[in-house]
């Protein structure tokens, strides 16, 4: 489907959703919930919390939908803005330090040797901690590119930036991660 057809389809869907058409609201949820879950999960690293926060995002979106106006950015960008705010609010309410949860795949693996599991878990922990040390914009680019699976063009549209600035942010983020991981390894 071409971008302009999809944009027009999304515009019509949004108009129906703003009139509280249940089918349109459901379609918006199904289009965006999985990507929002991945985006939030990377930041909170707890499945039930991420699921709750996705629900909070859609509740807030539903409350504010009558006031939503197309400003030239994708509707999804508006949802990511809400998601980012919900994650910040979550940590403010918790008033706790972010902790690293082991990768579920590694925790469930029984075939590997125990010493190999420890090494892999430590690598996952170190990588997640390094991502937390990036700037907010760098974390957002890394999350959208590598956890949610968006293209450079999609990330640029979602963040309201040029493709060149997203590429530069990604390059700086990956260089910082490399330095942080090398420094921590030494």
Image (cartoon, rainbow, N blue to C red):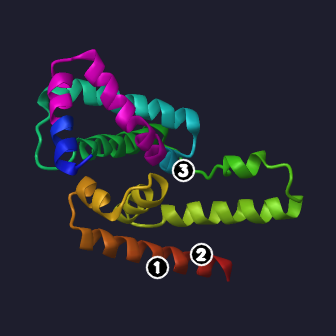
Instruction: Using the numbered discs, state the Cα–Cα distance from disc 2 to disc 3 in whole angstroms.
Output: 21 Å
Q: Is residue 42 left or right of residue 181?
A: left
User: Which circle's residue, 2 or 1, is located before the other in the chain?
Assistant: 1
Vertical placement of 148 versus 7: above or below? Answer: below
Disc 2/disc 1 C-alpha distance (Å): 10 Å
> What x and y, as percent, mark residue 6?
22, 42
Query: Which residue is denoted by mark 1 in the rendering?
Result: 175
Task: Note whether 114 is above or below 75 in the view shown.
Answer: below
- Is residue 18 left or right of 35 when viewed as pictured? left
Could you say where residue 167 lies in the image, as x and y percent from the top left? Answer: 33, 73
In the rendered image, the vertical position of residue 169 relative to residue 140, given as above or below: below
Q: Are marks 2 and 1 in contact (CB under 8 Å)?
A: no
| Residue under the point 42% across and 34% down | 54
The quadrant the C terminus occupies is bottom right
Measure the C-alpha gap from mark 1 to mark 3: 25 Å
Frontmost of labels 1 and 3 is 1
Task: Write the residue at 45% across / 39% down.
Answer: 34
Residue 82: say if magenta: no
Looking at the image, is mark 2 or mark 3 earlier in the sequence? Answer: 3
Asked whether disc 2 touches disc 3, contact meaning CB atoms under 8 Å apart, the reply is no
At x 21% / y 63%, what residue is drawn?
A: 161
Dot 3: few (<14), some (14–19), or many (≥20) neighbours within 10 Å?
few
Element type at mark 3 = loop
Q: Which mark is residue 77?
A: none
Question: Residues in magenta?
Answer: 11-40
Compared to residue 126, the image places residue 52 above or below, namely above
Label 2 belongs to which residue?
A: 181
SS state under label 1 = helix
Tag nearer the camera, 2 or 3: 2
Report the residue marked by disc 3. Answer: 97
Which comes before the other along the chain, label 1 or label 3? 3
Counting other residues with Cα less than 10 Å from the Cα at mark 2, is it few (<14), some (14-19), or many (20 or more)?
Answer: some
């Amino acid at each position: 489907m071409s971008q302009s057809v999809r944009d027009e389809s999304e515009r019509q869907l949004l108009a129906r959703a703003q009139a509280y058409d249940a089918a349109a609201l459901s379609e918006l949820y199904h289009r965006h919930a999985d990507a929002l879950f991945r985006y939030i999960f990377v930041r909170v690293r707890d499945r039930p919390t991420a699921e709750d926060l996705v629900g909070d995002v859609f509740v807030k979106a539903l409350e504010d939908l009558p006031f939503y106006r197309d400003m030239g950015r994708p509707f999804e960008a508006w949802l990511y803005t809400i998601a980012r705010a919900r994650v910040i609010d979550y940590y403010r309410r918790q008033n706790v330090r972010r902790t690293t949860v082991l990768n579920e795949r590694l925790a469930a693996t029984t075939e590997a040797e125990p010493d190999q599991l420890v090494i892999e878990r430590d690598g996952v922990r170190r990588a997640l901690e390094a991502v937390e040390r990036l700037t907010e914009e760098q974390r957002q680019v890394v999350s959208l590119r590598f956890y949610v699976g968006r293209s450079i063009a999609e990330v640029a549209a979602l963040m309201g930036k040029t493709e060149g600035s997203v590429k530069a942010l990604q390059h700086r983020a990956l260089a910082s991660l490399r330095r942080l991981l090398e420094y921590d390894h030494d």
